[in-house]
Image: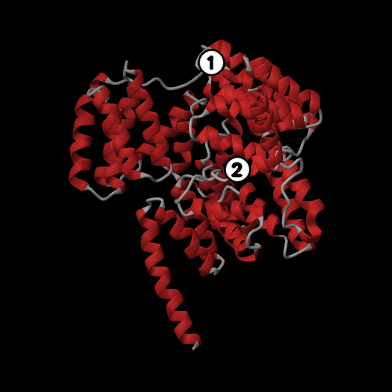
Amino acid sequence: MKKVLTLLLILLVGCQSNSEMPRQAGKASTELMKGLEAMHHVRFSEARSHFEEGILKDSNCVSCYLNLGNAEQDRVLKREYFEKALIMSKKGHPETKIIENAVNWINGEVDRFEVFPELYKKYNNDKFLASGAYRYYQSKDKIDEGRLLLQEASQRLNAGHLYNLLAYSYIWNAQNEEEYNAALPLIEKYIQINPNEANAYDSLGEFYLNKGDFDTAIDNYELAAEVDPNFEWASRNLSLAKYQKKLSNESVELMPRSTDSDNAKIFFNTGMWQLYNLEWKLAEESFSSAISEDNSFALAYAMRARTHFFQEQQDSMKEDLDIAVSMSLNASNEEQKMIMALSNDLSDGTNTFNRVIERLVKKYPDSSYLRFETIFATINDIGPDAVLRRGKELYAMNPDFTPALNIMGYAHLQKAELDNAKDLFQEQVRRQPGKANPYDSLGDFYLEVKDDEMALKYFKQSAKMGLEASQVKVDSLIVVIESKSTEEL
């Protein structure tokens, strides 16, 4: 029996390579490795810069394009980088398997990390492959198997980012407090190995934030900002922690909802978020769910009427407004004013809702939704400078409220401040890569700067994700592009 086990062990070791996977980097290997290191410590902006520097140094750096795609959240750019890498890649090269898989993944055909476990078995000294292998197990709900891999790899390779990923395997999947607390010594090990990585302290901040220990979370987010002032998550997460701490205080100034159902409140808030992302149909469904939980929730009827208005469903809008008005007597005084104002505006084209919101936000300044309404509902009345001022104040208070980026982008576009507009639209795409409207907005930007080809790519992406208005733009722009091509001939 011992002989059989020894033989199996020899065969296993023989199948592994005590090396890292070779990359197709050409003369840009230094830039590539700097980028990979930055990317795995969540310094995405820096990582993209390193990969771009690598491409400038060697235009045939296949791995630079692949990892530029990995570091990019924008699905349009991600697709371009992956496809470029595949065209340039060498057939039979181990990295080409990752590239082929990446292209198939972005086309919706396979799991993104499907090839990583096999490659990691062959190149078991590659700490970056180890990350991908774990993510494959995570995606397949094989958490224990993934943790075993990370435990072995993090210790053997002494890699801080692997300890961090192992910590998050508990943060993301913990079933109880004891399991959640298992993340703490792993994050502390990350800090021990990489004391100058801001992400290590940021992770510790998130650990305490999730436990409701706001002061300790804030201390660690501040430390992350001190360690690396350029770390893109530091100031954002610091502001978010301060905002959440404020929301936990009994003196917080938020407008109450006139429903006793917690589920109704959750569905309502989801609907408002979808409304601000121009997802009219989804918002309608969420408000309907809120009404199902509490059929006397007057404001939910009013907001559902709003989605009907945007979808040009006049009969449904009128029906919901009538219900909202009839039920408003049971709502709070503030909600009653909102409902009556909205009913007047949607029915008669008046502008009373904006004035009601302006007064309410003074009374409830901690409400992200009310603050956004002072922009969303009044954008055509207050001018771009006021939009930018209010948008910046909202985003500084609550950096998770990303629709503020979108509306500020259009304000810059209105002022012909094109670079600022692009930066904000691009940031929203990266913050909300799974939402259609940010891609549509970036398409509008490229249309404004006369780049029809790029505009078409973003409109197609948005249309693919379900925004019907984007499909109309796609159809129209295709005609324009074809017409220009005919004229050139």
* Residue 462 in picture, x, y percent from top left: 44, 54
Residue 16 falls left or right of residue 312: right
* Residue 72 in picture, x, y percent from top left: 61, 49
Observer able to see residue 356:
no
Q: Residue at x 74, y 44 (%)?
A: 20
Three-letter amino acid code at the position of disc 1? Ser
Work out whether mark 2 precedes mark 1 in sequence or the reverse, and give the earlier one: 2
Q: Residue at x 26, y 37 (%)?
A: 343
Quadrant of res 216: top right
* Residue 443 in picture, x, y percent from top left: 50, 59
Q: Residue at x 41, y 64 (%)?
A: 474
Question: SS for tag 2?
Answer: helix
Classify 10 Å Cα crowding around label 2: few (below 14), some (14-19), many (20 and above). few
Q: Residue at x 57, y 10 (%)?
A: 178
Read off the residue under disc 2: 118
Q: Which disc, if any, is residue 248? A: 1
Question: SS for tag 1?
Answer: loop
Circles 2 and 1, Cβ within 8 Å, touching? The answer is no
Q: Nearer the viewer, residue 119 or 393?
A: 119
Structure colour scheme = secondary structure
Residue 350 falls left or right of residue 48: left
Q: Nearer the viewer, residue 348 or 415?
A: 415
Q: Nearer the viewer, residue 83 or 242?
A: 83
Q: Is residue 487 above or below residue 62?
A: below
